């Protein structure tokens, strides 16, 4: 029966009406995945040299062991966004006269056959062969890499259990992010190295097979925990009722002050917190608020006037990340119920204005959350303020205008990572105005006068965009009305 289920999954794929389209998409995604894995392998091949250059005179093996915990914390984060159980397949199989246990074994094994599970192997296997094997022997190299890979695989089963047990709760994610940031900062400042807690395990793995054996038992136990939990909770009524209960009481009262557009903003907010893909975009926006740490901690950008102009892009990105990410699929989020808005009086107009309201509100939150960057100087706060004004005054209209060019349908219940439903040529080209449009307003004044004149121009044009908000937003509203039948027909296509 196990192999029969595999055969049925294969037939389901090749008999799909969208097989040709999905085949080309999968080929493209496969190429991207191979490219990313090749980068990981290259990093693994040069890992030893990188450690020697950054920590000259120190033991590379001991140093790496002391920082492995940060690799696993990072792995926890990207597994949270990428990894999931194929619930759609589960729903299609549960009503059949097939043992639930067999179905669950099949789905769990399918999730394990993923490129994510070979990242640790590709990254650390070259180091074990190049550095550990010559000094400690081949057996030590294999037990060490085995301990790392088993730890990574334990995280695989733990994540499947965690996401279902806590219904994609962000609490655990925030805790791990906090530990990662505080632990990394503590190690950088020399206060306390969090990796010292796990370092003895991997040090012992070099001289003894005991950690490998213990981790193997934990690996089996984590699979059994995940399997037992999913078997005990795999019921159709649970799968259908989870999303309904999850969105109760999630309205934002502030939006009700803006009439019907505010109600539409509330509906859009409920859509975001209800569905996996939109919820992932919201959480990524919070994560990318840390983007400034990449630039603001580098003296090259803070002290060099030639590179200082790059901070404009950083400010645009930080204060407008949700608007940029979520807005690029402007109407695709509503592809499943777009006809409903067409039938309502002023339904399309209020939907568009409701989205504007939501984008601006979350951009305000992003700006307020970025205020602590003033630690790096008042200039950073000034850049964030003017780029925020530019985002909500000018860039928001440009992004929505481009997003309305032949929008495509998508399934909101699917994950966001490596999912290109709803993405067309406009979404790929949208990065161009995001990167260069702010400089069209900034550079002439910055070059002719000074950088503060450029920032003032950026803020003034943003304020003008806010003052003429109704006229600018009317352009996109009218564009939706002009193409509403074409858009609606596109949204009715089978995915």
Image (spheres, rainbow, N blue to C red):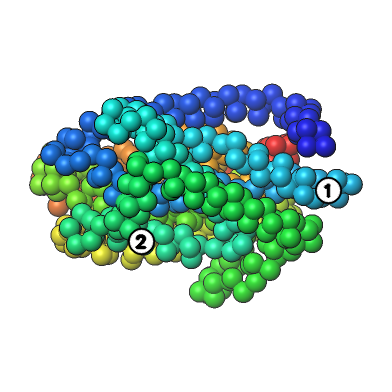
The residue lying at 28 percent from left, 27 percent from top is: 134
**In this rendering, is residue 447 above or below 285?**
above
SS at mark 1 in the image: loop
Q: Quadrant of residue 269?
A: bottom right
The disc placed on residue 99 is 1
Above or below, 71 against 129 in this view is below
Residue 9 spot, x, y in % from top left: 76, 34
Upstream in sequence: badge 2 or badge 1: 1
The residue nearer to you, when weighing 169 against 329, is 169
Residue bearing the label numbered 2: 179
Between the C-alphas of marks 2 and 1, the distance is 41 Å
Q: Is residue 287 left or right of residue 110?
A: left
Mark 2: give few (<14), some (14-19) or many (20+) Cα within 10 Å. Answer: some
Q: Is residue 483 above or below residue 297?
A: above
Q: Can residue 214 be spotted in the picture? A: yes
Mark 2, mark 1: which one is toward the viewer? Answer: 1
Which residue corresponds to the image point at 45% horizontal and 39% vertical from the top-left?
A: 146
> Which residue appears at 16% of the width and 61% of the height?
378
Pick whichever, 174 or 341, lies toward us.
174
Q: Residue 17's spot in the image, x, y percent? A: 77, 29
């Amino acid at each position: 029966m196990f192999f029969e289920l595999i055969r049925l999954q294969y037939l389901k794929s090749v008999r799909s009406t969208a097989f040709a389209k999905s085949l080309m998409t999968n080929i493209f995604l496969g190429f991207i995945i191979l490219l990313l894995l090749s980068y990981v392998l290259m990093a693994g091949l040069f890992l030893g040299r990188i450690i020697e250059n950054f920590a000259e005179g120190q033991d590379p093996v001991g140093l790496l062991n002391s920082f492995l915990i940060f690799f696993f914390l990072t792995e926890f984060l990207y597994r949270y966004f990428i990894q999931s159980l194929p619930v759609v397949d589960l729903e299609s199989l549960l009503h059949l006269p097939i043992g639930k246990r067999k179905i669950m074994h099949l789905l769990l094994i399918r999730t394990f056959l993923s490129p994510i599970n070979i990242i640790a192997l590709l990254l650390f296997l070259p180091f074990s062969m190049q550095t550990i094997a010559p000094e400690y022997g081949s057996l030590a190299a294999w037990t060490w890499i085995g301990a790392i890979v088993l730890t990574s695989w334990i995280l695989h089963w733990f994540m499947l259990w965690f996401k279902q047990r806590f219904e994609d709760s962000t609490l655990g994610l925030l805790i791990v992010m906090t530990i990662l940031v505080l632990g990394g900062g503590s190690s950088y400042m020399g206060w306390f190295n969090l990796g010292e807690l796990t370092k003895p395990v991997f040090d012992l793995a070099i001289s003894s097979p005991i950690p490998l054996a213990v981790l193997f038992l934990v690996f089996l136990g984590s699979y059994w925990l995940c399997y037992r939990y999913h078997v005990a909770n795999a019921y159709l009524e649970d799968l259908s009722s989870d999303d309904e209960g999850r969105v109760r009481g999630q309205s934002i009262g502030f939006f009700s002050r803006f009439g019907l557009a505010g109600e539409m903003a509330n509906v859009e907010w409920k859509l975001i917190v209800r569905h996996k893909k939109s919820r992932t975009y919201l959480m990524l926006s919070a994560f990318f608020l840390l983007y400034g740490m990449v630039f603001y901690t580098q003296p090259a950008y803070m002290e060099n006037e030639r590179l200082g102009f790059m901070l404009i892009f950083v400010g645009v990105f930080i204060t407008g990340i949700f608007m940029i990410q979520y807005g690029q699929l402007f109407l695709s989020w509503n592809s499943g119920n777009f006809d409903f808005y067409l039938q309502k009086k002023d339904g399309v107009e209020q939907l568009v204005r409701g989205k504007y309201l939501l984008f601006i509100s979350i951009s305000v939150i992003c700006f307020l959350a970025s205020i602590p960057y003033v630690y790096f100087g008042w200039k950073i706060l000034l850049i964030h303020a003017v780029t925020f004004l530019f985002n909500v005054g000018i860039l928001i209209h440009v992004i929505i205008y481009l997003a309305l060019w032949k929008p495509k349908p998508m399934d909101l219940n699917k994950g966001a990572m490596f999912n290109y439903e709803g993405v067309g040529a406009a979404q790929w080209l949208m990065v161009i105005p995001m990167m260069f449009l702010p400089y069209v307003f900034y550079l002439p004044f910055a070059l002719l006068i000074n950088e503060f004149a450029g920032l003032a121009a950026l803020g003034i044009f943003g304020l003008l965009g806010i003052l003429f908000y109704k006229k600018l937003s009317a352009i996109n509203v009218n564009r939706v009305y002009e193409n509403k039948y074409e858009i609606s027909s596109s949204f009715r296509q089978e995915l």
